[in-house]
Each structure stands twice: as C-alpha cells, then as structure tokens.
Amino acid sequence: MTPDVDLTAPKPGRHAVRDALLALDCRLFEFAAERNWPLAEPVLPRLSRSANHGVLWFATAAAMAASRTPRARRAAARGLASLALASLTVNTLGKRSVRRPRPVLDPVPLVRQLKRQPITTSFPSGHSASAAAFATGVALESPAWGAAVGPIAWSVALSRVYTGAHFPSDVLAGALLGAGAAFAVRGMVPTRAQIGTPPRPRAEVPALPEGEGLVVVANSAAGTSDRVRALQNALPRAELVECRPQDIRGELEKAAAHARVLGVCGGDGTVNAAAEVALRHDLPLAVLPGGTLNHFAHDLGVEDVRAVIRAVTQGEAVRVDVGRFDCGGTRGIFLNTCSLGVYPELVRVRDRWSRRIGGWPAGVLAALRVLRTDGHPLEVEFRGRARPLWLLFVGNGTYHRVGLAPGRRLDLADGRLDVRVVHGGRRPATRLLAAALAGPLTRSPAHAAVQVGRLRLAGMAPGTLLAYDGEVTEVAGEVTLEKLPEALTVYRPLAGA
C-alpha cells in the first residue's frame, strides 16, 4: 500500500468543511507554539524522546511487573498488547493511507524542537497512539494503575504538539486509534472484571476478627515474608509458622492438630499439601497466594493479603470441588490440574534446572528439550482403545479459553473433570499449538476434549510420570481420576457481602 491521500493538497471543487478543519488545526498549532508553557521546557521534549520505539512504555511495564502483584502484571501485559496492536495499525494503515507533511517549525521556539526530527508522515501520531493504547489497556485491567499511567500518557501526547512534531488533529486521531486498539484487545481477551463469577456454594465458617484460632504455615522458599508480615499485623492473634519446603507437610500436620482454621502461604504445590491435610482433619482452609502462578488462589478470587484478611475477619467462605487420582498405593488430590505425557516430563526437567538458572528460564529450556523428541511419551487405553498420546490434561473444573490457552476457571464447584487429549504423532510442538488453536471443545485430528465426573486409564507403563498441581509422581497400571464435589471449604471474600 502506498500513500494516496494528501490532506494539504488542493483538490478541484469546494471542500469547505475540510478546509475549515485544516485551518483550525493550523491555528491551534500556532497558538500552542506562541504560548509560554511553565515547567514544560525541561520535561516534555525529554519525555517525547523517551517514548521513541515504545521504550518508555516497556520500562513502565517492567516496573509494574516488578511490583509482584498479579493485577499489575496483567495490566502491564494488556498495556503492551494494546500498544503492539496500535503500532501495527498506525504503521501499516494509518501513515500509509494519509500523506500529510509535518508542521512547519518556524513558530516553535528552537529550545522546544526535537534534535532529530521525524521523517514519516504526520497523520496520525504514532507516539500518541502508543501512549493512549498502553494507558487505556492498563486502566481496563487495573483502574489504580491506569490513574498512575494516564498523566504520563497525556503528557507524551501533549509533547508532540509542544515540540512541533504534530498538529493537534494528528495527536487526537492517534489517541482515539490507540484507545480503540485497547478495547479491541479487551474484546479478544476479556479482563477479569468482565468475566462474572457465578455463585458458588457458600459455607458457614467461623469469623476470626483478630485471627485467633488461625494457624498459617508459610513456605519460606517462596519469598512470602512481606505477605506474612502484613497478615500478622492485621491478625495479631493468628499463629504463623515459616518453614522450609521439606518441612511443610510436618508443620501442616502439627498446625491441624490445634487449629480452628488451617492457613497456608505458598505456591500451588504448597496449597495442595495444605488442602490434603485440611480434608483429612475436616478444617476450613485460608489460602494466601505466595508462589509464582497461584492458579488456585486466583481462580478462587483471592489475589492478595487484603482478600484473605477480609474473608477471615468476616467469616466468608465457599465450598469447592477437589480432584483425586488413585493408582494402587499411590493416591493424591489436585486442586488445579492433573496431567500425563509431555507436561510431567517438562516439570521434571524444569525443576532440575530452576535452582541454577531460575524458574522462567528453566521452564523455557525444559519446553525446548521435551518438544524436540519424536517419541511418544505415553500410550494408554482410553475408552477401550490403545492410543499414543502427547498430552492428557485433566482440569479440576472447566477451564475457559484466554487467548490460545485454557487460562482460567469461572466455577470451582461445577462437578466436572475437564479432559483434553493431544494425540500422538510427529512434530509435537506443532500438534500442541494446533490443539491450542482448535479451542477447548473443538474436534480436530490433533485434539479431543470431554467433560466427565470420573475417568479410568489402563495400561500405564511402570515409571510413567503424572503431574498434579506442579508436583510429579510415578504411576503404573490403572489410574482412576474422579471428582470430590464441594469437598473443601475455603475462605474467600464474597461479592456484595
């Protein structure tokens, strides 16, 4: 596509509206150039340069992600996704469709002008589109972070007129395009606020205004000391025990012997261990997310210490389903997922490397190593037929699609196991991607899905790996997976309560 529209080129006939708008645009530009902007001179040109190629927004997103709060991370990711869509639209459609020269810089004081003037066409403003897209995307996920980022985005857009890089209409069009890109991203990947939480079975639990009777066991390896201190300050009579990962189960058993409410702070594996103890002792569970992903806590609606404090002090809780697997003498539960095939092998390789190079790099390395192999990692008898499989995924509750992947559950008490199968064959990476693109319930040559209450798998070879909530064990022979409906009581703030 080549530029084919010049807004400033005279055309045959009268174009009164267009000419009036262009004249107004020029007068506004000259008005802004003639004004004295207090305190803007040392700030706006530097701010404008810092937004080149999105550097300012990538740095802002990194700072937000460093806060270690799930909502901030989601807001940062949504902001960057919106920025990417806006930049793609501006560079492929906007500037190629409308050919408009940059403003003449004569009215702009030299001290305001950019040292390196842009050479692309003027309409629309790419900087303004990126700023509006990032700020709007952030605000749609987290209004608080949006309020913090919004003034910066507004200043970047304003700086484009202040430095003489754009006419006001360029900035306005860019900002509208950027905001539209953010809403388009929200249409493709809804925010958590958009997805309503269905009513779950409410449970009667004790309210502990100062935490008396609550015993919290925290995994010290998960970096949870700040969360534990915040909880202790709000609930001074709660008993808090910090311990190493290898001591978690022993400390949970000790806590359950005298607690009215069993609390846990850690990742999904630690929460799994606490849930198993709480089930055996018939205790309600309070979960404070303290790991990397915290799938169960986030799907439950508990994202930070404030949510836990509110639920415990006000006595708000729900009942949730628990998944259980049984293979001879090996038995366990899962709150999130249970899987066979490439994923357990990936978890094992990731754990082997994570202490040396960190969790995320280890995960990438593990995925690359596991998906390079061409051998079938699993062969099972499924519904009476022997099948080679790359992956068998079983979710405790129905997982709903977010983007390409099954991302979250809306109901933790739906009574169903969400079973996804990726059939064996060559090129596992291609097959896994095809399964993701196919959707959760779409039949395809690579992918199948079913929702059941109980599942039996036969013919497991000795030493077959089974992963559950981030942990790995070995199974052999016959494996049975089933639901325990509404078996676990968990503290959770209730909407409207």
Image (cartoon, helix red, strand yellow):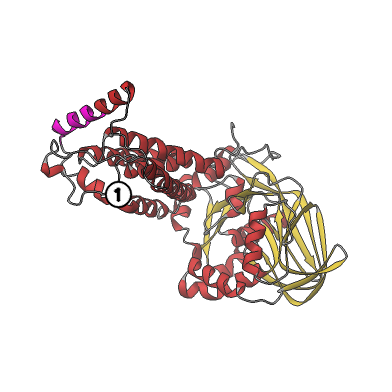
- Circle 1 SS class: loop
Q: Position of residue 216 (x, y in %)?
A: 56, 55
How far from the left and from the top, in percent, is residue 479?
A: 80, 67
Residue 329, by quadrant, is: bottom right
Question: Magenta residues?
Answer: 25-38
Within the image, what quadrant is residue 23 found in? top left
Quarter occupied by the C terminus: top right
Looking at this rendering, what residue extends furthest in the right direction?
A: 384
Residue 31 is a magenta residue: yes
Q: Is residue 371 left or right of residue 479?
A: left
Residue under the point 75% across and 59% down:
324
Q: Nearer the viewer, residue 199 or 262?
A: 199
Residue 117 relative to residue 203: left or right: left
| Residue located beneath label 1 in the image | 51
Query: Is residue 5 located in the magenta-colored stretch of the structure?
Result: no
SS assignment for the magenta stretch, majority? helix
- Specify the amino acid type for callout 1: Ala
In the rendered image, the vertical position of residue 50 relative to residue 310, given as above or below: below
Residue 146 seen: yes
As drawn, is 405 to the left or to the right of 481?
A: left
